[in-house]
């Protein structure tokens, strides 16, 4: 994954799909996650550029789409709804997109609102689809203020009673989670999906 060798990745995915092995598919996802971490490290060191990050995300998206049938096993019913967005003021979406793909593969119905999403749009979507979970993503420090404003707005509208909120992105941690008013946080898409699975049982 970290070498951005699309041909080699497709070859491995095709082998897993030929066996329809859910366990092997899960192992492959872990390998993809490790690869994406290395891609991020290469970006930080200046070896990779933003185009490489986007290409890596596209390769992963295509591979995950192929893996979905094996991950879904015996046609999982949609277990819960997630409204997902990169919050206002932030344009980063690679982590959000990885989370969305993994969540969908795990049986969630995901409403992805995209990037730079105003608070009102998120609140209106929550009213419309009545999700169990809201996922807020952001990489920039200023995104943390938008996350807090979104959570405050959900509370003001009386929508926080049974609604869980998870935040994700590079700058999030336990202190940020408490400051924002979220229920949990994750800096890793796979861990984020596990948290959501735990919430809905």
Image (cartoon, grey):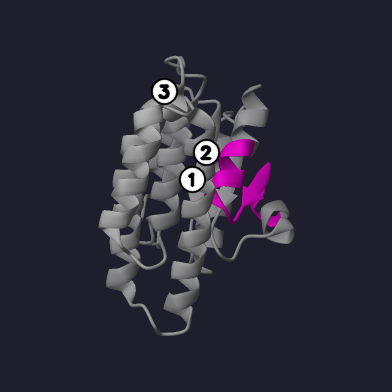
Query: What's the residue at 38%, 56% (across, down)?
Result: 93
Q: Which residues are magenta?
A: 179-194
Q: Is residue 68 above or below residue 113?
A: above
Kindly report the distance in space between the C-alpha atoms of the residues bearing marks 2 and 3.
29 Å
Q: Is residue 99 magenta?
A: no
Q: Secondary structure at mark 1?
A: helix
Which residue in the structure is indicated by mark 3?
Answer: 129
Q: Residue furthest bottom?
A: 46
Q: Give the mark, 3 or 1, whose residue is nearer the N terminus.
A: 1
- Can I make out residue 179 in this image? yes
Q: Which residue is mark 1?
A: 29
* Badge 2 vs badge 1, beta-carbon distance below 8 Å: yes
Q: Which residue was labeled with disc 2?
A: 26
Among numbered discs 2 and 3, the one appearing first in the sequence: 2
Residue drawn at point x = 45 percent, y = 55 percent:
95
| Tag 3 and tag 1, C-beta contact below 8 Å | no
Identified at 34% across, 56% down, the residue is 57
Q: Position of residue 198 (x, y in %)?
A: 67, 30
């Amino acid at each position: 994954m970290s070498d951005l060798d699309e041909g080699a990745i497709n070859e491995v995915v095709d082998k897993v799909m030929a066996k329809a092995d859910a366990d092997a598919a899960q192992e492959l996802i872990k390998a993809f996650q490790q690869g994406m971490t290395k891609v991020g490290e290469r970006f930080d060191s200046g070896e990779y550029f933003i185009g490489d990050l986007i290409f890596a995300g596209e390769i992963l998206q295509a591979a995950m789409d192929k893996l979905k049938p094996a991950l879904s096993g015996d046609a999982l019913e949609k277990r819960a709804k997630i409204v997902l967005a990169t919050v206002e003021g932030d344009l980063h979406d690679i982590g959000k997109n990885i989370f969305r793909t993994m969540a969908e593969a795990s049986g969630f119905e995901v409403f992805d609102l995209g990037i730079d999403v105003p608070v009102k749009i998120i609140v209106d979507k929550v009213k419309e689809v009545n999700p169990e979970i809201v996922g807020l993503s952001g990489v920039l420090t200023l995104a943390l203020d938008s996350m807090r404003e979104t959570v405050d707005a959900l509370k003001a509208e009386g929508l926080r009673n049974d609604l869980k909120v998870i935040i994700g992105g590079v700058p999030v941690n336990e202190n940020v989670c408490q400051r924002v008013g979220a229920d949990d946080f994750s800096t890793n898409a796979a861990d984020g999906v596990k948290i959501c699975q735990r919430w809905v049982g």
